Amino acid sequence: MVKLRALRHPEALLFLAAVLYPWLPVFDWIVEATMGMALRFDSQLVNIFIFAILALALNLQVGYAGLLQLGIAAFFAMGAFTTGVVTVDKYPFQLGFWGALLVAPCVAGLAGLALGAPTMRLKGDYLAIVTLGFGEVVRVILLNLENITDGSRGLNPLPPPWLPGSWETEIAQWNGGRMQFLTMYYVSLLLLGVLLVAFRTVERSRLGRGFVALREDELACACMGLSVTRIKLIAFAVGAAIAGCAGVLYATNLTTTAEPNTYDFNYSVMVLCCVIIGGLGSLRGAVLGAFVLLGFDNILSPLLTRFLQDFTDNVSGNVLLSFSNWRWLIFGTVLVLMMRFRPAGLWPASRVEAEMLHPTGTPEFEEEGAV
């Protein structure tokens, strides 16, 4: 009975569907049958899982602690390039994917501490400007350290995740050579699930309540005896470490770190949009925002472009008939309308939604006052 009740929750059903999808790609079959297009939705899901992890990292800093951070791409890049340094043949470390998954988050977390320590007294727009500058500085440094990062070429090839010898041979024979992809798929999905459970636990802990107190009123938080410095440093370090973990997955999935210019301000804004679209301070919202934004750009956009190509005969001669040329106009319009009519996000946290609907107090407080 307990298991059946657990399956009633949408998260459990969606997680089960994600686990089974590589073996039952129903959406791919439908798209191929109707449009003759090989979509490979499962490969797109890997990117969505990775950016959902990155959105959770930023949600910790912005949604929970109220620290407006615009340099999350810098820690994402640190995770990717640390993975390159400790895994490629150019360097003697050769730790492999699993070693990088331990080392890179530590490096990114220490960088988060280094950024958080001197910015303790900053908040709001001032903190946003500092973190934005930090992200640009990291990008330029990675670009100019050619002896270490190979500059604009990036470090490659990165080795795939490895499994014990007998497992690797059996799985490779069983799934027709998709062992590397399935490993990345399930590792990304598992890490996303573990982080969701961990953050849910933190929400109900003393530290989680400290994050909320800091977000609502820093002065009141300090007056209640909470260490504002400690809470801020934890938010910076843990968020940066999780972003570094996402960087490990991203670089390994690409088999290259990509060039440093890839991790520019646009990535930070994109992840921030994921958090805002889903709902600040909401775990479900952060994941949903990543699915909406990445799904729109990587899945829906190609499908609509293909539909327009099949529907019209002169799509190449008219730029307006190619959906890829004006998809961002639609996305921006939808984003503005959502901020106007749904400011709390698509799936807001219950606390934030209550504050939006009852600005003078919670519903329980108002009912008690009425009585």
Image (cartoon, rainbow, N blue to C red):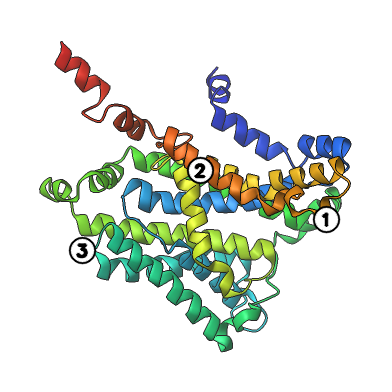
Q: Nearer the viewer, mark 2 or mark 1?
A: 1
Q: Nearer the viewer, mark 2 or mark 3?
A: 2
Q: Position of residue 48 (x, y in %)?
A: 61, 49
Q: Are marks 2 and 3 in contact (CB under 8 Å)?
A: no
Outermost residue to the bottom: 147
Q: Position of residue 52 (x, y in %)?
A: 54, 49
First-in-chain label (1 vs 3): 3
Q: Report, in whole angstroms, how far the alpha carbon at label 1 lies from the one at label 3.
A: 56 Å
What residue sits right under mark 1 in the picture?
Answer: 317
Quarter of the picture containing the C terminus is: top left
First-in-chain label (2 vs 1): 1
Front position in the image: 347 or 310: 310
Q: Secondary structure at mark 3?
A: loop
Q: Is residue 179 left or right of residue 352?
A: right
What residue sits right under mark 3 in the picture?
Answer: 121
Query: Quick one: label 2, few (<14), some, or many (20+) residues within 10 Å?
Result: some
Residue 343, label in figure: none
Give the total of numbered labels.
3
Q: Is residue 284 visible?
A: no
Query: Quick one: label 1, few (<14), some, or many (20+) residues within 10 Å?
Result: few
Q: Is residue 24 left or right of residue 193?
A: right
- At label 2, the amino acid type is Leu
Residue occupying the point 42% across, 61% down: 240
